[in-house]
Structure formats: C-alpha cells, structure tokens
Image: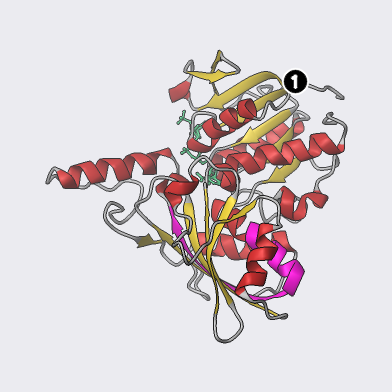
C-alpha cells in the first residue's frame, strides 16, 4: 500500500469509544486521507465532525461484502458479537484492524497490545490487533515498570468502574435513574441487573470453579497475556460505581525484590504514560473527575504494607488510555516503525 495518509474506517463510530477515536485521530493529527464512520441502521446519515468538516455515518448492513474495500486501517468499537461479524470482513479486504471488543483478545495469533508495555509485538505481519479491556489497560501500565524493577509475585485489584465503560446506554441509565429517584419516580433497569444510581454493583459469577465474573476473568487473563507471565497470580474484584467517566482501581502487589513506597513512586514517575499524583502531606491523590480527558494513567496513595507489599490507587480515563487512545497509539506505533506507511 505504502501511502502516507490513510483511508480510515471506524466501526461503531457513534458509540462512546468510536466518537472518542474520531476525536483523538483529529486531535493527534493522525494522517487521515479520508474517514469512514460506520454504525447501525439507526445512525445512518448522522454526521460526525472531523477536521472541521461533517462526515456522514454509513450503516453496516448484513450481506454487504465490499464495505471495507479500499480502506487501509479500520478501528473496531462495537460489542464482540458485531466484531465477530465485521472484523474478519475488514481483514479479508486487506485492512489493518485494531479491535476494541473482547472477541479476539485471547486468540493466540492476535497480539493484545499496550504500546508502552508490549509494543515490540507489533509488526506488519499482523492484520488484526486487539486492544485490551479498559480496566486491564490502566492496571498493566502500572504493573509493567514495577515488574521490570522488582518482579511481580502476586497482584490483587479491586476496580471502581464508571458506567461509560459499559457504553452509552449505561450512561443514559445512570442519568435516568438518578433523575427518577430524585423525582420520587421508579428507577427502571435495562442495562444493569441492579440499580446503579446511588449504588455499587458487581457482576454475577461466570466461572464455576473460581467464582469470578466475566469482567474479572478478562482482567486476569489479559494481564497475564500482556505481561507474558502465564502463571502470574492475579485476583480481581470488579465493581461498577455511579461515576460517569474514568475508572479507579485499588491495587496491591507483592514483588520478589522488596520496594519502598518512595522507590515505587520513583519507578512509576519515570515510566512513560504515567503521572504520579501523590502527596500524602498535601492530601493529593487522583479521582475519576480529575483525569477525564487525560491521556496518562494516574497513580496515588502509594503505600507499603508491613509484609513488603505495595498498595496503589490507579485512576485513568477509560475512554482514552482504556480504549480509543490506546488503539490510535497502536496505529501510530506501527506507522512510526514503517516510516509512516502501513503495508
Ligand atoms: N467504553 C469503554 O470504556 C470501553 C473500553 C475498552 C473497550 N471497550 C469495548 O469497545 C466496544 C464499544 O464500546 P462502547 O462503550 O463504545 O459501546 P457503545 O457506546 O454502546 O457503542 C456501540 C457502537 O456500536 C454500534 N452498533 C450497534 N449495533 C450495530 C449494528 N447492528 N451494526 C453496526 N454498528 C452497531 C452503535 O451504533 P448506533 O449508535 O447506531 O447504535 C455504536 O456506534 C465494546 O466491545 C466494548 O467492550 C469499551
């Protein structure tokens, strides 16, 4: 192909991740020759703003086979069922596909990539690259430099995940339920099985042996795959909280080499894509609201436990490093490694 400006498709361009992708492509001046946003029938003809122009959204219709012909890069931002239907068509049309769904993440021949962590896996021989789950991305960004310095022995994480991590219908549900409750009306539930407004909820267990939920299983498996440590003991409890955007995580690690809190802070401060925002004396630590729209993963409340472990509070914008930004960074990494050409 060898072009320096690319024809770029975004599948699910009207969703939370898809819209963020379009914004990030624009903001980072990614070399886009033409943008092709795709969504459901419901959004056909809607427009998105890109490079100060309106671009029309096209519906993806079952049976249309040549819809991706001529595109160089396709960013996927639909659920995994739709990704299984459309991503293989884009790959067979010769596009490089970076998919955000969980459909292909654990396939052995599909790299699951965070450029700062395992970007070395990216090469022009891959036509499909998977983007990790939002909670995994911010966790692994922090684990990797600590592992390089002290070798991880065990990781335990409890997440506080915002509703935007579930998609736009969940954002609407939190807003709707909050307004309904404050107006003494019934808080109808459609997305989550329990009320999310004024509540915290956990997913149902899906693994009959471990009792882990689907989200917990994803974090455990994806963390091991990205860090390339198949047997790393990882324990996760995922909690959905009534926050609109950005996920927080309470993380505890044990390492082979004992680290002090100051050493951990220094390691993290030197790592790419991480901001240490931690000043116990001034009571400074990151909250979800602080990091909305930010690219970096923020870390605070770094503390040692009496047995040599480290506690961390890790907060990031789930729609940026947790999804859209990471996908665009993968494409940028590939372009950089091939002198600005995808082939
Ligand atoms: N949200 C996050 O923080 C996050 C982070 C990492 C990964 N992910 C993953 O990224 C994916 C997208 O998540 P999201 O939060 O952006 O979801 P979302 O807000 O619900 O958006 C879903 C998108 O899929 C489109 N779509 C629905 N049905 C379709 C159909 N039949 N044909 C074509 N397009 C269709 C929607 O188009 P319409 O607007 O026309 O309905 C919309 O553009 C999911 O797999 C999710 O797990 C999300």
Residue 60 at least partly seen:
no
Q: Secondary structure at mark 1?
A: loop
The residue that mark 1 highlights is 70
**245 relative position to 127: left or right:** left
**In the image, which residues are magenta?**
140-161
- Label 1 beta carbon less than 8 Å to ligand 1: no
- Measuring from the top left, give residue 291's x and y in whole percent: 50, 47
Image quarter hosting the C terminus: top right
Against 326, residue 141 (above or below) is: below
The residue at the point 55 percent across, 64 percent down is 217
The residue at the point 75 percent across, 20 percent down is 70
The residue at the point 32 percent across, 55 percent down is 193
**1 relative position to 73: left or right:** right
Q: Nearer the viewer, residue 304 or 209?
A: 304
Against 126, residue 92 (above or below) is: above
Query: Residue 170: which quarter of the image?
Result: top left
Instruction: Point out the residue furthest to the front here.
Output: 281
**305 relative position to 176: left or right:** right
């Amino acid at each position: 192909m060898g072009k320096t400006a690319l024809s770029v498709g975004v599948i699910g361009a009207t969703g939370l991740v898809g819209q963020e992708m379009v914004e990030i492509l624009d903001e980072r001046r990614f070399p886009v020759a033409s943008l092709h946003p795709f969504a459901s029938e419901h959004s056909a003809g809607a427009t998105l703003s890109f490079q100060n122009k309106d671009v029309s959204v096209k519906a993806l219709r079952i049976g249309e086979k040549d819809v991706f012909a001529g595109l160089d890069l396709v960013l996927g931002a639909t659920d995994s069922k739709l990704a299984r239907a459309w991503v293989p068509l884009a790959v067979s049309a010769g596009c490089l596909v970076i998919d955000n769904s969980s459909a292909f993440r654990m396939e052995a021949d599909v790299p699951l990539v965070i450029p700062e962590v395992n970007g070395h896996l990216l090469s022009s021989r891959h036509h499909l690259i998977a983007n990790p789950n939002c909670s995994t991305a911010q966790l692994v960004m922090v684990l990797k430099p600590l592992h390089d310095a002290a070798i991880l022995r065990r990781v335990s994480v409890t997440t506080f995940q915002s509703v935007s991590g579930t998609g736009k219908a969940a954002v609407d549900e939190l807003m709707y339920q909050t307004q309904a409750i404050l107006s003494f009306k019934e808080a109808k539930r459609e997305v989550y099985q329990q009320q999310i407004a004024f509540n915290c909820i956990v997913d149902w267990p899906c693994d009959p042996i471990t009792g882990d939920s689907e989200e917990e299983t994803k974090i455990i498996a994806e963390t091991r795959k990205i860090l390339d440590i198949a047997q790393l003991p990882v324990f996760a409890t995922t909690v959905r909280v009534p926050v609109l955007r950005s996920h927080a995580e309470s993380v505890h690690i044990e390492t082979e080499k004992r680290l002090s809190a100051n050493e951990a802070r220094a390691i993290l401060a030197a790592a790419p894509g991480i901001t240490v925002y931690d000043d116990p004396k001034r009571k400074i630590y990151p909250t979800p609201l602080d990091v909305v729209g930010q690219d970096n993963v923020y870390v605070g409340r770094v503390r040692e436990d009496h047995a040599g472990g480290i506690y961390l509070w890790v907060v990031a914008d789930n729609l940026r490093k947790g999804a859209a930004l990471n996908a665009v960074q993968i494409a940028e990494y590939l372009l950089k490694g091939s002198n600005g050409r995808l082939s």
